[in-house]
Amino acid sequence: MLTRIGIFNLKLTITSTTLNISSNPILRRRTISIMAQRSIAVAITGVGLVGSEFINQLLSFSLPSTPNSRYNPFKIISLSSSGHTLFSPNGLEVTSTSWKDSLTQAPPKDPKDLISELSKLASGSSYNGVVFVDNTSSDSIASLYPLILSQNIHVITPNKKAFSSTSTLYESIKAASLTSGAKYLNESTVGAGLPVVATLKDLVNTGDKVKKVEGVFSGTFSYIFNEFSKPGETEGGEKFSEVVKKAKALGYTEPHPADDLTGSDVARKLTILSRIIPSSQPLPEGYLSVSTTSLVPDPLLKSDANEFMSRLPEYDSKFDELRDEARKNGEVVRYVGVIDLEKGSVKADMVKYPKDHPFATSLGGSDNIIMFHTERYGKRPLIVQGAGAGAAVTAMGVMSDLLKLL
Amino acid sequence: MLTRIGIFNLKLTITSTTLNISSNPILRRRTISIMAQRSIAVAITGVGLVGSEFINQLLSFSLPSTPNSRYNPFKIISLSSSGHTLFSPNGLEVTSTSWKDSLTQAPPKDPKDLISELSKLASGSSYNGVVFVDNTSSDSIASLYPLILSQNIHVITPNKKAFSSTSTLYESIKAASLTSGAKYLNESTVGAGLPVVATLKDLVNTGDKVKKVEGVFSGTFSYIFNEFSKPGETEGGEKFSEVVKKAKALGYTEPHPADDLTGSDVARKLTILSRIIPSSQPLPEGYLSVSTTSLVPDPLLKSDANEFMSRLPEYDSKFDELRDEARKNGEVVRYVGVIDLEKGSVKADMVKYPKDHPFATSLGGSDNIIMFHTERYGKRPLIVQGAGAGAAVTAMGVMSDLLKLL
């Protein structure tokens, strides 16, 4: 809402000459065009793979201003990496090739000092709103969201930390947003560019009753279980440790595969989604309270990546048993997340599905798939499926959030 | 943008006491709360199944205004059926049970007179924007959108007519929206409440390159071909005319099934989507230019529903042949819509798919499924699936568009 106060201030300066603004069509059009071309200021923190791709998408964006001309409504006013910050209240001269060199030569800046500068812009009249885009996965940046939002600066981020950790932080974020009117948008925290968060919000906000959300929320687990437990195979098949090795070689896992296999990434995503759904039963307080089955064998909890990979075959027999058991019933094994509103439970675990179930038949590569079982969609759920990780599609989710502010 | 002029006018009236608005946090908060609680005015035309369900969803909606209280930011200012209009510039007293009786007792009102009243509200300061919601499937209402938009009134609708007919009307709509700043939103014209239009816009606006959009866009065709051509059946199976009869009995077709079987509904949806995608090659000028295979046999073009149903079995052999041909290659038959950007073609037709393809395996009931093949999503498309027809999910699409205006 404070954005509008910004608009109001701008309007005041031209009021004396345009008080007949809504009755004179020519003046009206001109004023509108001035307003339309005031930019939204974008402050970007985190310039890794996702951040760089986001900058490219942002620089390429344009809107029609007349039937024959277009303009970019966004202006980048700051860029921050861990040790450097470029900031200009009037907008940086950023091209897709120039910014990396400039940034590495820039001095550091305390994030709180940056926020204080952004705050001045948010309460001033030069911009049609200020947005802080956090493309890091940093806990410390996430902990600043309440402060940022309280200064009427919008927050957009693929960073799961703030929305999946303690409910204290989450409640502060909601309260700060409610008080200032600044928005937080986090579409790309679940399923990257897939419309998952927005779809769930739409279901809830339009009054549908969500009964269950279940899905393959991790690209890593998707690849591993699609390869390990194939609907067409009735015997044999690769060992679990072999599949993990292949996944690592293809870049589908973190450098240390155990970071994926703990399931905590899935637990974080489930926490984010569960917080959007009204529930009569208490849902987990944070991702640590989600019932999560880790696939990291206890004795390997402290192994480094090399030891982990070399000792993982010792545990193949347990996975073989599970696969055999599933096969006997015409089923496959998938690592899924389930939010069951009727049971009031949130779980990240291996579950068996019939071999004609979409989790068995439709998935390939490292696709995510998410099913929304609701009252309105009856017996057949609403399904969203596709790549759920990768810089381009994650940046797309961030960019699509930014477009919601237009 | 004119909405904002509305805000500006309101602000002027309180300026004298709150010029220090952004520096005094208490005054700031109070002003924000005044602004937040100014409503968006909603004028609803069409109160059939979708319209009634939309009214229910609208009345049930609320937003938090403080951590402990909620409010509904929308106010219904008019309701119109074909012969009656209720209008009150200050908002109608509408409850989910009361409006039907009041409306049937109301006099008629020329839509242009209504628009003229709405126009006054849109340029005034009482509301935070005015929205015209068209829940009819009327061509004549659709032809008024340019006028409505030019008066700075937003248009939200599940009515496909305006967006799939001549490009002349569509271009007028775009031009009126661009000039006034009023928005038109039509999520529910394709796939009802499924996120299809918004997803395509996000892909395009974030710079992805769309290569092909293909899908089962019709609930009627989905049901008919899911039953007629099953991936598990290698011989026999129901006759085409028997399946159509069943579909009609279950309410999956229009009262006259030929209205669905012409494929023109699919052609309209393809036109709507194709107009969102930038293309180097010219796409169809309107739905009549979409290459569309009608399943209505020529000799039955003028039959009434009874004659049509009783004579349809005469044409079963052609469908049997097609099914046999598909089976020989391990395929099924589906009636799909395809926008191929590389070929520059838009087609509504029967196509054969391998029996492990999602169009063969994942569909059930009258589900829609839409695949977006893009540069960014690589070899594995982004998929959206679920019920694509029905009052509740269509109204949800309309309501989700309305929420985008908040």
Image (spheres, coloured by chain):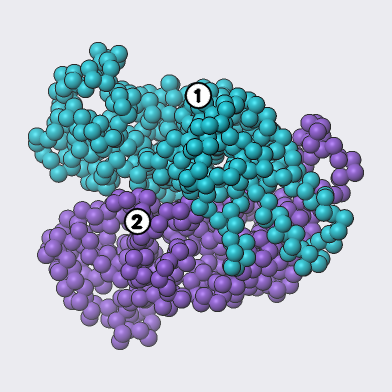
Chain colours: A purple, B cyan
Q: State the image quarter where residue B43 is shown.
A: top right
**Residue A205 located left or right of residue A343:** right
Q: Amino acid at mark 1?
A: Asp
The residue carrying mark 1 is: B139
Task: Kindly tell me whether residue B61 is visible in this rendering.
Answer: yes
Residue plotted at (70% across, 73% down): A112
Q: Position of residue A374 (x, y in %)?
A: 36, 55
Task: Classify mark 1: helix, strand or loop.
Answer: helix
Which one is nearer the viewer's eye here, B311 or A160? Answer: B311
Q: Quadrant of the N terminus of chain A?
A: bottom right
Above/below status of A129 relative to B391: below
Task: Kindly tell me whether residue A243 is visible in this rendering.
Answer: no
Mark number displayed over residue A373:
2
Q: Residue furthest left?
A: B236
**Residue A243 located left or right of residue B280:** left
Q: Position of residue B45 (x, y in %)?
A: 53, 33
Task: Classify 10 Å Cα crowding around label 1: few (below 14), some (14-19), many (20 and above).
Answer: few
